[in-house]
Image (spheres, rainbow, N blue to C red):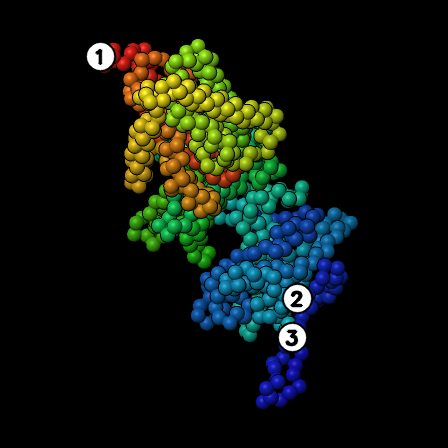
Amino acid sequence: MKSLNERSSLAYFDKVLIVSQLSSATKYQFESKGVVEKACNPYPYQDQLLNETIDVYKGHEFCAMLKQFTLGQIFDVVPNGSCNSHCSKLGPFEPESEIDNLHIVMQELQCESKVNGDGVSSARVSAILRAIPPREDFRGKQRSGLDGMSLSMEGVWDSSSGQICMVGCLGVTNRCGSRICLYLALSFSLTQRSVLIGTISSIADSGVGSYFPLLFKKTVIPSELMSMSSDSHLSYKYSKIHLARAFLEWDKSFDVSVNVKKLFFIYPNKENIDELVVLTTLYNDLTLHTYLSTVSSRGVHSFLILEILSVGSLFGHCGLYRNESTITEDHALLNVSAYLSLRGHPNMNDSSLSLEGLYNPFDGKMYLIGCRDVSIATMDCLIQVKVEYPPKNVWSFIIPTAKVSITSQRNKDDPLYFHQIKFETAPILYQNQRLDIISQRAIKSFLRLIALSVAAASILGQLFYIRATPNSVPYISIVMLGVQALGYLIPLTTGVEALFEKRLFYPEHPLPYDLHENLGFYFTTYMSKLLVVATFLLTMMLIQKVWKSRIRLHTPAPLELSRVPNDKYVLLVSLAIHITGFLMVVVVHAFGANGSKLTSVGYPELEKREKKFCKWETVVEEYLGLAEDFFLLPQIIGNILWKLNCKPLRKTYYMGGTAVRFLHHLYNYFKGPEFDPHYGKNEYVMPSSMLGDIALSITSVLFAIVVYVQQSFTYEKIKAI
């Protein structure tokens, strides 16, 4: 479209080219046979990749495979390092200026395949190859215009060579001076991790329009290998196993705990090297997609991706392919290849490492040799990487995090040298540990039923006890009963489970699907709620009876108030003690030394959501739990103020209540850290919290002993002692 106005007119505009994009129903006409033969003669064309020791796809499902790995995919471009300042490093593309970090996308792919009488497959291919500058942030793959950053291509593929050879025309011109050779790779190695490799070269050897060849590639993603055709025979060629073995032997010489780990710990392992189901489980267990446990100085949460490519005889995912290069001198060790990528880490610069080495299932350590791209056509392969996985059988007692160390083997004066990098991941979960989480919740529910049953029975026993000893009823502290009632009222109003929970103000996180289908879990949950209601009502009945007994005691002698026990001073003294204790907890929190503080590891999205909760609410929550532990404190104060000469509390009542709190802290001490990946955030008790559980348990037992002594001896005897 062009303007008919004069150039001097304000209505004039430059010539506009409008190009229609092909629809999915369009029938493409292949008409460039002569041009293709000229560019690819003789076929296959002898490009720089044809003689590489790379196995390429030559099967009958070529078109489906090509579409899978090209449509919508981003290809990395390797600029030609042989180019000087007088030539373009970007091949045929004509950007406005030289561009670093250029990418390529393939669009409008058309592929027609056929098989001749001899069983040889061939195909005709057409597509548009578009260069995407980094400023377009990958949104350029949605563009459809033809310009100096696009190549219209057409060519052929033959199963005898596995090469796609196409001719390319720049933009909308007739400048068809580019040759594109493309391969679908089936063999991989430490330095070859591309599933699709291609070159763009000039048909003309010299002169106008010639340029240096351009290499582009697509890195293999293990999850994409699941849909590879059945006639694909993938393989991995190990080349650094001897270096990984030397690394392993060197590390074992400094590790004296290897034999201990073999005896007590279980790590991700295999049962039979020929059993693909077991290897697939191991494959999934060794794969890591998680945040790091620490935050960088810039406040960024780094994210680790350790993607396994092959392990043992398994190549790819879900046991579809076999890798033959897996024999090691020690059959207990497994060959392994992987990718490691660390996003947001200040020392890694969002780069990735290609890895291969050995995995020792007896100590859960992976010894790897790594390579990284450092410049055009140059890789740094003098890198050692060690990954330590947590044991599977003690995850309830330790924080299950993986540890990674990356070390350069170069001299410190080498430009490629870097300081050792060490980091620890957020908690991880192995595939079969889902049942352990369900078991832990089941145990927690069962213990909750026992504790609530003991609490309800002790209060019920106290109600029967006061019938036999009505004169001692007024000497039961209403403040003590109020503290207990509050402990049962909060779960009823907030929805959390009573006992064995750290969170008081927020309900337990959504249940996994496994528990939704578990009738036994539902039964224990509803029984717990019924017991909480029953215990709360029994406590309120006890408060009512104490209140009425004091009114009856006051009625015969209204002027003799001193005869009637009063909780006013008990409340004041208890409040003074608790306010002092609360202020001490606040001070401890302010200095970061609180023993029962919960530490959240990883998953920054939920950390931001609950950031406000982790301050005052945490302090109040913790102290309410402490007040429940000290529920006998008001009774002890009342016994002193009222000069007790009777036994208002039954032994089973205060000992039963103490046993419930003791069981709660005993469970918290032995259960270890809580980890539930179903809601993405994990809370861990610091080691000092275990000391807090011990201290609170001892204190509650001491309070029960004090009450026993006060009730066993009259006030005069205690005073005499």
What residue lies at 39% left-to-right and 32% top-to-bottom?
624
Residue type at tag 1: Ile
Front: mark 2 or 3: 3
Residue 83 position in % (x across, y down): 46, 66
- The amino acid type of the residue labelled 2 equals Lys
The residue lying furthest to the left in this view is 720
Identify residue for label 2. Answer: 38
Label 1, on which residue?
Answer: 721
Q: Dot 1, crowdedness within 10 Å: few (<14), some or many (≥20)?
A: few
- Labels 1 and 2 touching (C-beta < 8 A): no
Label number found at residue 17: 3
- In the rendered image, the quadrant that contains the C terminus is top left
Label 1 or label 2, whichever comes before in sequence order: 2
- Give coordinates of residue 358: x percent, y percent: 46, 36
Relative height, residue 388 to residue 552 (above, below): below
Left or right: where 620 falls relative to 641:
right
Label 2 vs label 3: CA separation? 29 Å
| Among numbered discs 2 and 3, the one appearing first in the sequence | 3
Marks 1 and 2, Cα distance to the nearest angstrom? 115 Å
Residue ID at (27%, 14%): 715
Report crowding for label 3: few under 14, some 14 to 19, many 20 or more residues within 10 A (C-alpha): few
Q: Find the distance from the CA under tag 1 to the CA under tag 3.
A: 107 Å
The local secondary structure at tag 1 comes to loop
Q: Residues within 10 Å of mark 2 (few under 14, many from 20)?
A: some
- N-term-proximal mark, 1 vs 3: 3
Furthest residue toward right: 117
Which mark lies nearer to you, 1 or 2?
A: 1
Residue 475 position (above or below residue 227): above
